[in-house]
Amino acid sequence: MNDILELVHTAASREILYLPHALRQMARPQRRIRRVEIEAVVWKGTAIEDYPDDVRGHSCLMSGVGQNARPVHVVCAPKAEYLAIITAYLPAPERWDAEFRRRR
């Protein structure tokens, strides 16, 4: 997972691009995920699933902490010029372990 994390950080250092789907998911009233939370996950979070064969290009699921210590998941894809934020959501506790890093 360190390889994808390095790719994520390299791409994010160039630019972070929020795809339309991600912006819609972030703006949902029950989520209201802010960009600062996404960036915290990108820079301080953990890559918990790697998707090297994703149709959108190599991507990964990252887990981290947002405002008020709430868990946030981000799916992102590192590109040569930028990091694409594909989607973001608040993981459901019944679907994840206590640290929100492994599916039940």
Image: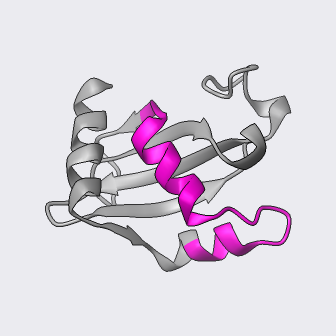
Q: Position of residue 36 (x, y in %)?
A: 55, 59
Which quadrant of the view contains residue 82? bottom left
Residue 23 lies, in percent from the top left, at 58, 75
Residue 54: x, y in percent?
A: 35, 51
Residue 40 magenta-highlighted: yes
The residue lying at 63 percent from left, 64 percent from top is: 34
Q: Magenta residues? A: 23-49
The residue shown at (56%, 36%) is: 63
- Taking the magenta stretch, the answer to whether it contains residue 94 is no
* Side (left or right) of 101 relative to 68: left
The image quadrant of residue 31 is: bottom right
Q: Is residue 87 left or right of residue 90?
A: left
Instruction: Decide which of 63, 39 is in the foreground and name it.
Output: 39
- Quadrant housing the N terminus: top left
- The colour scheme of the drawn protein is one colour
- Toward the viewer: 64 or 24? 64
- Front in this rendered view, residue 51 or 47: 47
